Image (spheres, helix red, strand yellow):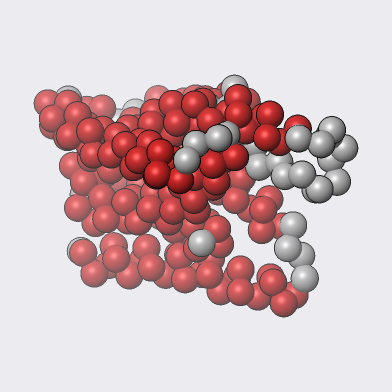
């Protein structure tokens, strides 16, 4: 899923969302400034643990006292839910903007978000269990956070329909998020698996992600 996500996210951003934004007639300098701002904003969000939690595990070679992770997870549980809810609400707005710009772009943007969200939601579920949530409670809270994407989609659709000049900027912000996550988070995970046996499936799955986006966009057009 990580390798497939990289292919889908990068190709959606670089082959579809950014070209759509730049073809809209909006000033390229302001769109590039928006891209730069988006990349720096995602960096800061990650710094302040709003976007994603740390993927540290006991026994990974970092010398922490026993029980360090349970303590950290306990503190992180509610932060994960707040951050995930905000993240999903934003994803809904991005999907709405993409559909308003071009239905095929909406499809591939939704695909990119789904491919990344599935492993992330599984990870968040495990963090909530470590934080002391029961399985039922963790599942319900995770589901409520996921539904924030639907709310974001509705808000985005009705807001951006009336302010269509904002759509190129939202597409650029979506692209900055996809590029940042792929390059700073997912690709380093892939690099840790450096053997040829693990690298070949990664290359194949990244290529499948790119081809899937190309197929959907060509098929839609």
Query: Is residue 194 left or right of 7 when viewed as pictured?
Result: right
How far across and how far down the image is residue 44, in percent? 58, 24
Where residue 139 sits in the image (x, y, percent)?
Answer: 39, 44
Q: Is residue 143 above or below residue 1?
A: above
- Residue 82 image-quadrant placement: top left
- Left or right: residue 29 compared with residue 215: right
- Look at the image and tell me in which quarter the C terminus lies: bottom left
Name the residue rendered at 62%, 33% in the picture.
73
Residue drawn at point x = 42 percent, y = 70 percent: 211
> Residue 146 location in percent, x, y?
34, 41
- Residue appearing at x 49%, y 45% in the figure: 125
Q: Nearer the viewer, residue 49 or 125?
A: 125
Quarter of the rendering containing residue 150: top left
Residue 190 located left or right of residue 126: right
Whether residue 77 appears in this view of the structure is yes
Quarter location, residue 145:
top left
Taking the image as drawn, is residue 171 in sight?
no
Residue located at (33% from left, 50% from top): 109
């Amino acid at each position: 899923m990580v390798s497939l996500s990289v292919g889908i996210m990068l190709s959606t951003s670089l082959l579809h969302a950014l070209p759509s934004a730049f073809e809209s007639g909006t000033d390229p300098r302001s769109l590039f400034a928006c891209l730069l701002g988006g990349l720096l904003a995602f960096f800061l969000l990650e710094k302040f643990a709003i976007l994603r939690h740390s993927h540290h595990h006991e026994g990974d070679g970092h010398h922490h006292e026993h029980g360090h992770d349970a303590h950290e997870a306990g503190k992180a549980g509610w932060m994960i839910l707040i951050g995930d809810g905000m993240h999903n609400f934003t994803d809904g707005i991005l999907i709405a903007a993409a559909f308003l710009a071009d239905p095929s772009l909406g499809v591939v943007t939704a695909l990119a978000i789904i491919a990344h969200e599935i492993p992330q939601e599984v990870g968040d579920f495990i963090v909530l269990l470590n934080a002391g949530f029961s399985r039922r409670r963790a599942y319900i809270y995770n589901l409520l956070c996921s539904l924030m994407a639907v709310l974001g989609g509705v808000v985005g659709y009705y807001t951006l329909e009336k302010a269509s000049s904002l759509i190129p900027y939202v597409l650029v912000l979506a692209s900055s998020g996809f590029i940042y996550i792929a390059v700073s988070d997912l690709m380093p995970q892939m690099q840790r698996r450096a053997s040829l046996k693990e690298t070949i499936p990664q290359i194949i799955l990244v290529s499948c992600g790119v081809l899937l986006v190309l197929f959907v966009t060509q098929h839609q057009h």
